[in-house]
Image (cartoon, grey):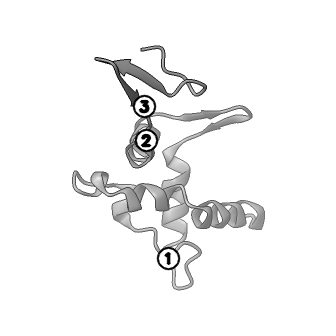
Amino acid sequence: MHVSKELSYFYANGQKLFYFFDAPHLLKSTRNNFFKHQLSFLNGMTDKIYLEQFYIFDRGLNRLAPKLTVSHIYPGPFQKMKVSYASQVFSGTVAAAMKTCIHGGT
């Protein structure tokens, strides 16, 4: 098909068909892979264990990431289908809360 970011379509039976990514599915797949394996970045790696440790720390009265639940950290089959759970795991709120814990020395 030779589809690329520069050429996002192909022809089939004389019809021009456009190819696009299913962003919600990619987000859930990224979360599922992150939960099974380490995630690599240009400047390092991360692991689910850091998210688990943050969740355990943040279970107190004044939560830094109040939307994060045990179902986000240990999703069952139905929770794995929810895009909102995947987006909340990778949300700016959770990232900022984890940074606060890191820089706060906890």
Residue that sits furthest to the bottom in the current view: 61
Name the residue at 52% across, 35% down.
38
The answer to which of marks 1 and 3 sits earlier in the sequence is 3
Name the residue at 69% across, 34% down.
44
Q: Quadrant of the N terminus?
A: top left
Residue that sits furthest to the left in the current view: 77
> Which mark is drawn over residue 26?
2
Disc 3 marks which residue?
19
Q: In this picture, is 88 found above or below 44?
A: below
Q: For the residue labelled by badge 2, is the local secondary structure a helix, a strand or a loop?
A: helix
Q: Give, as a three-letter code, the residue at label 1.
A: Pro
Q: Quarter-wise, where is residue 83 in the image?
A: bottom left
Residue 65, x across and y down, in percent:
54, 72
Q: Give, as a three-letter code, the residue at label 2.
A: Leu
Tell me if mark 1 has few (under 14), some (14-19) or many (20+) residues whose alpha carbon lies within 10 angstroms of its own. Answer: some
Q: CA distance from mark 1 to mark 3?
A: 37 Å
Name the residue at 25% across, 54% down.
76
Tell me if mark 3 has few (under 14), some (14-19) or many (20+) residues whose alpha carbon lies within 10 angstroms of its own. Answer: some
Q: In this picture, is 97 found above or below 11?
A: below
> Which mark is drawn over residue 66?
1
